[in-house]
Structure formats: C-alpha cells, structure tokens
Image (tube, helix red, strand yellow):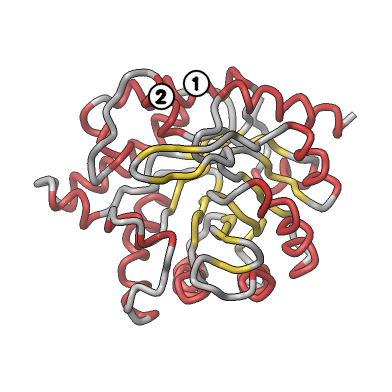
Amino acid sequence: MRTGTFAAALAAGPLVLDGGLSNRLVDAGHDLSDDLWSARLLADEPAAITEAHRAYFAAGAQVAITSSYQASFEGFARRGVDRAGAVRLLRRSVELARAAGPGWVAASVGPYGAVLADGSEYRGRYGLTEGQLVDFHRPRIEALAAAGPDVLAVETVPDTDEAAAVLRVLDGIGIPAWVSFSIEGDRTRAGQPIGEAFALAADAPGVLAVGVNCCAPEDADPAVGVAARAGGKPVVVYPNSGERWEGRDWRGEPTFRPDRVAGWLADGARLVGGCCRVGPDQITALAGVVRAHRN
C-alpha cells in the first residue's frame, strides 16, 4: 500500500520498478510501429496501457513508469492534436498508471531524441543549444508535474548537455525526480565519462536518485558503483534484457538475470527494474531478490 512520500519510501529500502512497457503491449497484440510508439495508445487504446501497468504490479513492481516517454507537444501536433489535447494526453498517462494499482507512479520524461523517432536518443548531440533543449522540455515536464505523479523519471538521457537542460527545468518544479543515463561501457551515449554525468545530476537538490537505464546489463553492473560514488545519492538501475536491436529486430540472448540484482543492491542501488525486453516474469524474479535483501 502506498503511504507517505516517494522520498520516504525510497529512504526506507529498495523499491522495485516495472519492466518494459512497450514489450508488454506488443506481447498483448498491440501495434507500436508509430512515431509516437506506446504514447499512441494514450488516445487510441488507453485501457491497454492500464492493463500493462497492472501486469507489472501483479508481478511485484512497486513503481509504474508512465507511457509518456515518447509523448510530446510536437509529436502530438503532427497527429493533429492541439496543445490542450496534448496536455490531456500527458495527464492521462499518469491517470492510467494510477488506476492500475496502489503503487507509486513515475512520470516518464524521455530525451529529445525519442521525439525524433530516428534513434538519436542513443547518440545525443542533437545540434541544439541548452536553451533550445530547455524550451523543449519545460512545457512537457510542467504538464506531467501538474498531473500529480509521485516522481518524475527523467530517463535514457544520452549526454550531459541534455541533462544540464533538464536539470534547469526541474529546479523549482515541485516534484522530485530521478535522472538515468543511457550508456555504453563507461561512457554516455555521446561519449562523456559516466562519472561526470552522474555527478552533474547528483548535485541537483530535486534529484532523488541517479543511475542508468536502457543499456546492457553488463554495462549496468559497474555503473551502479560509479553512480553511488559520484554523489552519494541512491542509485536507479533498469537495463535492457541484453538482447541487441539490429536490422529492426532483437537479436542475441538475454543476459538480464536475477543474480545481477543482488550485486546492484550491494553497490548502492535503491530503485531496480528493467527496460526494453524485460517482462513481468523477470520482474517477479527481481522482486524476489529485493525482498530477500530487505529481510
């Protein structure tokens, strides 16, 4: 049962995040081959989103990350949705997660590159100034904050430039946040040392946790310790399954295993879950490791 504040719950012990929302929706038969990705269902099939969140709560997740990752005013405008309609859909993403169960709701704030739907969120360095990135992120973050989530999940950040812009927006927004970077090896996707990226976010007073997501489990393992040392804040970690996206398909074998979770917790992780291709079964196994750690 959800009581108190998210910050207090985080201080009390590790929390289990959900898994990949998109793979759960695809497994349920929904077509996400659209520039809006899972955000398309906010307008077309909202009940499907609630059901996906509910499946993760049933699997043991304590935190649902909303379907707003690829949602933006610009993306909705291309579909003929006006600004007021976009605000309603962003708000709906929080409402649908809230309706799924008694857990915590984290409003997803994806990077600018996600809106382009061309994979540039895995490269960063968009050619925009920090001010332009602030102008992009501010209205969406304000709309999501107004919907009343428990926390903002600023996720899959590819570089420190975008992190700096988002941190400017978060200052004074009134909702706590975690910031997680997408990395490769010991670098952000844009090539900066991850320690520098983590330290930048860890210095922000409104940020509750810092870490990684949407990366290989093998890269997440050492990154947790680096994040813990960078600023002394709790660490968030939710990598992909370990499969690789190649030729518009997933290839390779999963390397997301429950035995990794104990190591993350020992190194300072307090928010643990999965991203792309991690489903309810894996979250059930992860939640079991977290329960054992608490005891």
State if disc 2 and disc 1 touch (CB < 8 Å): yes
**Badge 1 element:** helix
Q: What residue is shown at x 57% (from left), y 60% (from top)?
A: 183
Quick check: 236 left or right of 33? right
- Give, as a three-letter code, the residue at label 2: Thr
Q: Nearer the viewer, residue 58 or 259?
A: 259
Residue 113 percent across, percent down from the top left? 35, 61
Residue 96 in view: yes
Rendered position, 233 above or below 77: below
Quick check: 274 left or right of 29? right
Query: What's the distance in space between the residues labelled 1 and 2, CA to CA?
Result: 6 Å
Quick check: 159 left or right of 116? right
Quick check: 153 left or right of 121? right
Quickly name the residue at label 1.
54
Question: Which picture quadrant has residue 219?
Answer: bottom right
> Callout 1: few (<14), some (14-19), or many (20+) C-alpha neighbours within 10 Å?
many
Rendered position, 119 above or below 129: above
Quadrant for the C terminus, please.
top right
Quickly name the residue at label 2.
50
